[in-house]
Image (cartoon, rainbow, N blue to C red):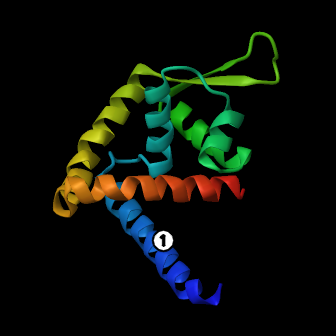
Amino acid sequence: MEETTPLAVALFSEILMADQLARARLSRALPKGMELSHFSVLNHLAGVGMERTPAQLAKLFHVTRGAMTNTLNKLEVAGYIHIRPDWDDARRKFVAISPAGRQARDSALAGIVPIISEVVNELGDERVRATLPILRELRAKLDAAT
């Protein structure tokens, strides 16, 4: 086990540093006032094309319900999402992306796609394709441990 410790530390150090650099670079490319967490929620809602509860979103993004509520409140104030009560259970709410939210998400994508495309082009499609299964498996193992 001790033989793999330096390898494990090196792997996670690289992942954490890459995450930090990617977040900083992408955050600068987002439209004024949009945070990466806002984009992530809008991108998810646009992708699934259906409503989600705040609890489902919190679980999906591995954040507390309070943190998700804060993000959703900011998105609602900006007009990017609609939050409605569950007609069957007044304690529950549903979240959907609004047309303005879809436009904001598309604008954000227009800003970040050139950045991520440049990185992929520099690394090469073949190397990125080879890396994706490893990263997905790593994510799955980390997710299973939570």
The part of the image, by quadrant, that contains residue 73 is top right
Q: Quadrant of the N terminus?
A: bottom right
Say whether residue 109 is left or right of residue 84: left
- Position in image of residue 106 (x %, y %): 31, 33
Say whether residue 103 is left or right of residue 3: left
How crowded pointer 1 is (Cα within 10 Å; few <14, some 14-19, many 20+) is rated as: few
Q: Residue at x 49, y 52 (%)?
A: 136
Please, is residue 41 above or below residue 92 in the view? below
Q: Residue at x 67, y 34 (%)?
A: 56
Please, is residue 90 above or below residue 136 in the view? above
Q: In terms of depth relative to the viewer, which is nearer, 13 or 115?
A: 13
Q: Quadrant of the C terminus?
A: bottom right
Please, is residue 3 above or below residue 130 in the view? below
- Position in image of residue 33 (x %, y %): 40, 47
Element type at mark 1: helix
Instruction: Say whether residue 31 is visible.
Output: yes
Q: Which residue is mark 1?
A: 16
Q: Residue at x 30, y 40 (%)?
A: 109
Q: Residue furthest top?
A: 87
- Position in image of residue 49 (x %, y %): 48, 21
Q: Amino acid at mark 1?
A: Leu
